[in-house]
Image: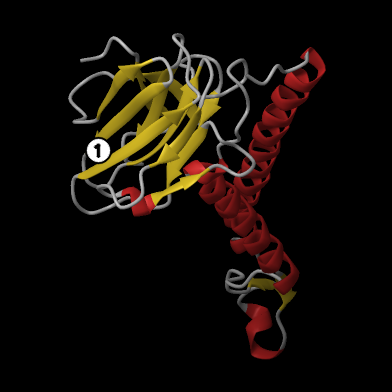
Amino acid sequence: MVVQTRATRDSTLCMIRIRHLYFMVLMMFCSFMVLTIPLLQTKQQVQPCTGTQAHLSTTHRSAPTSMLPASTRRMMLLAMALVAALVQVDAHPSALECGTDATTRLVPGRAMVMQGPVTKDPGGTGMAAKLAGAGKSLMVTISAPKDFFLAARVMGGGSLVPIKGAGNNANLNTTANCTAQVFTTAAVSTTATYTVGVVGGTANSYVLLGFTDGSTGPGIFVINATQTTQ
């Protein structure tokens, strides 16, 4: 079992907070640009009248400016692209760092995922996770409704190893530099079943399953599958 020092744990939490702050700054900048568009578009230029128009009015207003300067448009497009990229990356379970039992964001209430809270499964989602066996001989079976994607992590010791050829396991991948966490690479259009073995588990091992369909709002739901789950 990997033991994490306090310095490493603090560093991981710091990186999470920095990413969230980066996202907020980009969102604020993009919002500012969007709010200034109407002001830029309605800017009018006052030009003097000449010739026969002089007796009607000393000045006239030109048509509202309909085009923003090229540099402004490029800046707006860049800001929007950066925000969209950040949201897309953070929204995919592949962006969920490995962490440790003490820092993983799959624990309800600990941190945010997909720009929202991590909460317990409210029920009615159709998602289910069962952990069979005991100690070092454990197997977790996950049933997922269509259009859901997920990430699963073993807690209390052990590694997750997808069973080759079982169910929809071809859609499972292991988190980078991590043996304790797996995730789906894409949401499937039919009900999916995943079977994952827990290697080197202990009597305290259990599995956290975080999931979302992306349409229920920011954040994810979590199921706790323990060795007493039937």
Residue drawn at the location 50% of the way across and 19% of the way down = 155
Side of 179 relative to 47 (left or right): left
Which residue is nearer to you in this view: 48 or 204? Answer: 204
Residue drawn at the location 32% of the way across and 28% of the way down = 140
Circle 1 SS class? strand
Give the residue at the far right of this rendering.
Answer: 7
Side of 119 relative to 48 (left or right): left
Q: Residues within 10 Å of mark 1 (few under 14, many from 20)?
A: many
Q: Does 191 sit above or below residue 105? A: below
Q: Does 172 sit above or below residue 77? A: above
Residue 5 seen by the camera: yes
Residue 114 seen by the camera: no
Q: Quadrant of the N terminus?
A: top right
Which residue is nearer to you in this view: 230 or 124? Answer: 230
- Look at label 1 and name its amino acid: Ala
Give the residue at the far bottom of this rendering.
Answer: 51
Residue 175 picture location, percent across and down: 55, 42
Residue drawn at the location 36% of the way across and 24% of the way down = 138
Quadrant of res 222: top left
Side of 110 relative to 228 (left or right): right
Residue 223 picture location, percent across and down: 34, 21
Which residue is nearer to you in this view: 152 or 66? Answer: 152
Residue 27 picture location, percent across and down: 62, 42
- Residue on which disc 1 sits: 144
Q: Does 75 sit above or below residue 5? A: below
Residue 141 picture location, percent across and down: 28, 32
Residue drawn at the location 20% of the way across and 15% of the way down = 230
Quadrant of res 47: bottom right
Which residue is nearer to you in this view: 39 or 163? Answer: 163
Side of 146 relative to 134 (left or right): left
